[in-house]
Image (cartoon, helix red, strand yellow):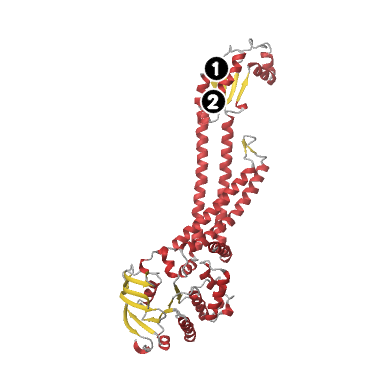
Amino acid sequence: MELITIRNASKTYKTGVTAIHDLSISFKKGEFVFIIGATGCGKSTLIKMLYREERPTSGQIYIGGIDVAKITNRKVYKIRRKLGVVFQDFKLLPKSTVYENVAFALEIFGVPNDEIHAKVIKVLDLVGLKKKAKQYPHQLSGGEQQRVAIARAIVNGPKILICDEPTGNLDEKTSLGIMNVLEAINKLGTTVIVVTHDTEIVDKLKKRVVVLDQGRILKEYAEGEYRHEAI
Amino acid sequence: MKLFRILSRNIRDSFKSVFRNFSLSVASISCITITLIVVAIAIVLSVNVNGFTRKVEKDVTIVVFLDEDITEERFKKIEQEIRQIDNVGTGQKDVIARSKMEIREELMKSSDTYNSVLEKYDTRDKNFLRDAYHVKVIDIEKMEKTANALKKIDGVDTVKYGEGMVERLVTIFNFVRRATYVVVIALILVTAFLISNTIKITIFSRKREIDIMRLVGASNINIKIPFIFEGLFLGILGSIIPIIVTTYGYSSLYDSFNGQLFGNFVTLVKPNPFIFGASGILLLIGMVVGMFGSWRAVRKHLKI
C-alpha cells in the first residue's frame, strides 16, 4: 500500500533554479528508504516538499491521500501531525531539558500529563536516553542530541519519519547508532525516509535506495541491491 | 478539559519563557517601563490641564442686571424665568439673586468710602444700585445664546459675561484640551510601536522555537497563544514601575504643593481616585500593547 505518492513534481525557486524536475516516485507503508545524491541534487528540496516547507511548482504530492501541495499555510499543521521530521542540526530547544523537548510535541495538543509522561519515557527508552531525561541539550553529545530529536519526532506516533541528513554532523560510529535507532523505529511500522550523502552507511543498511541527480531520479535500488561503488 | 489543559500549559510556559529568556525579557520590560512612564506623565499633565480648564469654565458667570425701577415682587419672580432658559445651570447655586440692598450692604462693609457714600440710600426706592442675578451655565460654548435669551426677559436691563474674552477662553481651552488628547494618544501609539518592535526583536531571536513548533505540528493559534501570554506578562511586569511612580509620585507631588500651583490659581486633581484610574489605564496599555506586539511579531514568522 502506497503511503506517499509523488506525481510529476517539479520545483523551481524564485531565483530561477529548478531543484526538482518532473519527479514521480512512491513510498510504501513501513518502508525504509534512503535518498542519496551529491550536494545540490535536490534531495533536501524533495523532502521539504514532503513536509510542506516548500510547495511544488507543478505536480502532486499525496500523503495518506491528501495532496500536500494544495494545503494552505494555515492548515499545514494537519499534515505535519502525521509526520515526524529530524534535521542535521537537531533543532532542539536549548533552554529545555531532554524530557521537556520531547514532551513539547505532545503538550501543544493538550495530551494529559500522565499520558505525556508514559509516552516520553517510552520513546526516550527506545532511543536509549531514559537516564538523561533531566539534562539539557548542551550537556549531551551530538549523537545524543540527535536521538532526542528522533524521540521528539516519533513521540506522536507519526506514520512517516523524515530525516534530513540526520548523521551529517556525527562520526561514523555515532551515525551507525542513529541508524540502528531509525531501524528499530521502522520495525515498529513507521515509514522512514532518510536523506543522506553518507553512502557508507547506506551500503551497510541494505535498504531501498533512490539516487537523485540534478532533480531527477538517476537510479533506484530495491532492498539489498545497493552497493557503495554504484554512484 | 483539553482546551483548559492547553491554556494552562500555555500560561505556565509563557511564564517560564519570561525567565528563561531573561535578558530579552528585561529589554522588553525596560522598554515598556520607560515608555509607560512617559505616558503616565502625559496623562498627569492632560488630566490636570483638563481639570484646570473645566474649573475656570465653571467659574465663568453671567451677571444679569435688572431695570432700575423693578419691583421687589418682579425681581423675585424673574428667578423662575431665568431657570427655565436652556443651558442655565440646574443647581441651587447656579442662579443666585443679588438684591440691590444686599449689594449695598456688602459694598458698605468693604470700605469706609463706600460706607459713607451709600449710607443715605437706605431704602429700595432711594438705592440707585441694580438688582442682579449671577447665572452659571452648563455649556460655556453656548454662553452668548444664553446671554441673549436672558436679555429678552422682561425687566432685564443688561447682561454681562465678559463678551469676547469668554469666547477666546473657550477657543484656547478647547485647543489645549484637544492638544493634550492628541499628545496622550500619540504617545500611546508610539509606545505601542516601540514595545511591539522590541518584542519583535526578542521574538526574532526565537525563530527557531517557532520553527520547531511548526514542525511538530502546532497550528498557528497553538504557536501564537503562548507568545501572546508572554506579551501579556511582559506588559504587566513593565507597567509595575510606572504604576508605582504614578501612585507615589503624584501623591507626593500633590502633598508637597498642597494641591495647588501658582498660589491657588491652579488646583491639582486630587490623587484619589485619579491615581487608581491612571494606574488602571497604564496596566491596560501595558497588557494590550504587550499582547498586540507579540501577536504582530509572531505573525511575521508564521508566513512560511
In the drawing, does residue B229 fall left or right of residue A51? right
Q: In the rendering, at what x and y percent does residue B263 appear?
A: 65, 35
Q: Do the residues labelled 2 and 1 touch (CB within 8 Å)?
A: no
Q: Is residue B173 above or below residue B122?
A: below
- The residue at which mark 1 appears reads as B156
Q: Nearer the viewer, mark 2 or mark 1?
A: 1
- Name the image quarter holding residue B63: top right
Q: In the rendering, at what x and y percent does residue A158 appear?
A: 46, 74
Q: Is disc 2 in the same subunit as disc 1? A: yes
- Residue at image x 44%, y 70%? A80
Mark number, residue A121: none
Q: In the rendering, at what x and y percent does residue A204 appear?
A: 42, 88
Q: What residue type is labelled 2?
A: Gly
Q: Nearer the viewer, residue A27 or B278?
A: A27
Q: What residue type is labelled 1?
A: Val
- Residue at image x 50%, y 68%? B209
Mark number, residue B162: 2
- Name the image quarter holding residue A198: bottom left
